[in-house]
Image: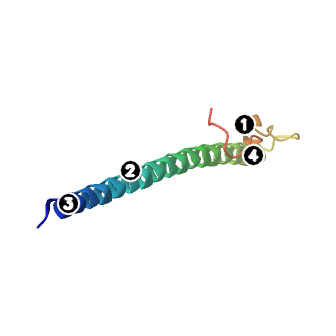
Amino acid sequence: MSTELVVGLSSAVVAAVAALLTYHAATRSQRVSRMARMERRQDVLEYRNRRLWMYCRQLVDHIYQHKPPPPPAWPDDLDDDEDAQPA
């Protein structure tokens, strides 16, 4: 084998490995970022669900105890956007 062929093949292998590693790093970074967004959204939705349950529990208690109107006030933090940070 000639020296030029060996150098050319080794350069091609190095370039292919570098491209593969770059692609792997980019897709992994993208997956990690997406996972972080999904976990944050799940935290927000779980918080909202707990607050809705608590409000419904207050309404049931209000009715069960035969209290007069008005019913318990709607929680202010449930009016926020779904993507807001939980308090």
Where does label 2 land, which residue? Answer: 25
Where does label 1 land, which residue? Answer: 77
Total residue callouts: 4
* Rendered position, 87 above or below 6: above
Residue 46 position, x and y percent, is 57, 47
Label located before the other in sequence (1 or 4): 4
In front: mark 4 or mark 2?
2
Q: CA distance from mark 4 to mark 2?
A: 51 Å
Image quarter hosting the C terminus: top right
Callout 1: SS: helix
* Rendered position, 33 above or below 1: above
Q: CA distance from mark 1 to mark 4?
A: 17 Å
Q: Are marks 2 and 1 in contact (CB under 8 Å)?
A: no
Residue at the image point whose x is 63% and y is 36% from the top? 85
Q: CA distance from mark 1 to mark 3?
A: 69 Å
Q: CA distance from mark 3 to mark 2?
A: 31 Å
Q: In the image, what residue type sits under mark 2?
A: Ala
Where does label 3 land, which residue? Answer: 4
Residue 51 position, x and y percent, is 65, 42
Residue at the image point whose x is 79% and y is 40% from the top? 74
Image quarter hosting the N terminus: bottom left
Mark 1 surroundings within 10 Å by alpha-carbon count, few (fewer than 14), some (14 through 19), many (20 or more): few
Q: In the image, what residue type sits under mark 1?
A: Asp
Residue at the image point whose x is 28% and y is 60% from the top? 12
In front: mark 1 or mark 3?
3
Label located before the other in sequence (1 or 3): 3
Q: In the image, what residue type sits under mark 4?
A: Leu
Residue 19 position, x and y percent, is 36, 56
In front: mark 3 or mark 4?
3
Where does label 4 land, which residue? Answer: 59
Q: Are marks 1 and 3 in contact (CB under 8 Å)?
A: no
